[in-house]
Amino acid sequence: MQRKLKIVYMGTPEFAVPALEKLIESEFEVVGVVTAPDKPAGRGLKLKYSPVKEAALKHNLPVLQPEKLKDEGFLNQLKDLGTNLIVVVAFRMLPELIWSFPKYGTFNLHASLLPQYRGAAPINWAIINGETETGLTTFFLKKKIDTGDLILQEKEPITIEDTAGTLYKRLMTKGSDVVLKTVALIAENTYELTPQQDPENPKGAPKIFREDCEIDFNKPVDAVYNFIRGLSPYPAAWTNALGKTCKIFAAEVVQKPVDSEENIVSDQKSYLYIRTAKGYISIKELQPAGKKKMYVDAFLRGNKV
């Protein structure tokens, strides 16, 4: 006999929207949505709704935006909705009094094959580290972040051309299917849990700050290439090597030998190579501070390097 689920969905960014839409379109009942408080944005500092709030309002769903998740009033709101399952996709860390109360639990969608790449930026770090495969995991929440028992996992290849942006979009779409499958298993009570085992060589996915994004050209060319694409388009790798601070969005490994010992090699028209510890990287798309994003030929027309 199928369980009667009353789902509260928690998420904030674009990544969380497809899974919410898929649940709304399904046979399951979404009774409410929890997202981040509205934030002032733009020159006028008008309050901006999160992508998840926009989607929820489109479907006339109740939206909760608590400042403090430990607030007893917020817990009472969830109980008043009849919540018996919480689904979390790209939301902040929940206190135990929230994730532990639903009858059928609280599960999270994570963009890696746990237990590897626990943390806030699994898509970025998988590419930075040169992985050829990643995936998606749903798991029930526990006290320690990203350590709960696994429900479902699905793999996704990473190509050598992938950036964080292209992989993000594929996992965002695929993630909606994984969430729906997980909810169906919980409704039918047919899932089997797999406890997470800590790996011998754990790879983390900590939050990335601006200072983490500076390119180290003392590393081999493949590592530099992976670093750039793993941070593209956001938060974006950057360098001061060109005489000014520039974000680098696209690059290629120079395959042919470069007959030079210079750190920067260019014809001042169409190509710009930067020397690494082993080989040269060709800069393809960049953004100087205070300017728009541009291709390398446009950059070279206005800048001598």
Image: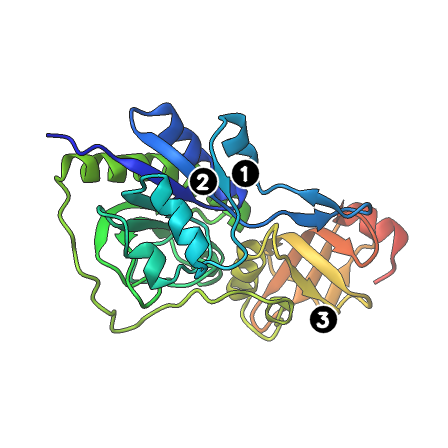
**Residue that numbered label 1 is attached to:** 53
User: Callout 2: 10 Å neighbours few (<14), some, many (20+)?
Assistant: many
Picture quadrant of residue 117: bottom left
Q: Would residue 102 appear left or right of 3 to someone viewing this image?
A: right
Residue at 39 percent of width and 28 percent of height:
24
Residue at 25 percent of width and 35 percent of height:
5
**Residue that numbered label 2 is attached to:** 33
The front one of 277 and 249 is 249
Among numbered discs 3 and 1, the one appearing first in the sequence: 1
Mark 3 element type: loop
Mark 2 element type: strand
Q: Would residue 130 appear left or right of 197 to someone viewing this image?
A: right
Quarter the N terminus occupies = top left
Q: Amino acid at mark 2?
A: Val
The CA distance from mark 3 to mark 2 is 53 Å
Q: Amino acid at mark 3?
A: Asn
> What mark, if any, has residue 263 been given in the picture?
3
Mark 1 element type: helix
Among numbered discs 3 and 2, the one appearing first in the sequence: 2
Kindly indicate whether the residue at mark 2 contacts the one at mark 1 (C-beta within 8 angstroms): yes
Q: Would residue 265 appear left or right of 134 to someone viewing this image?
A: right
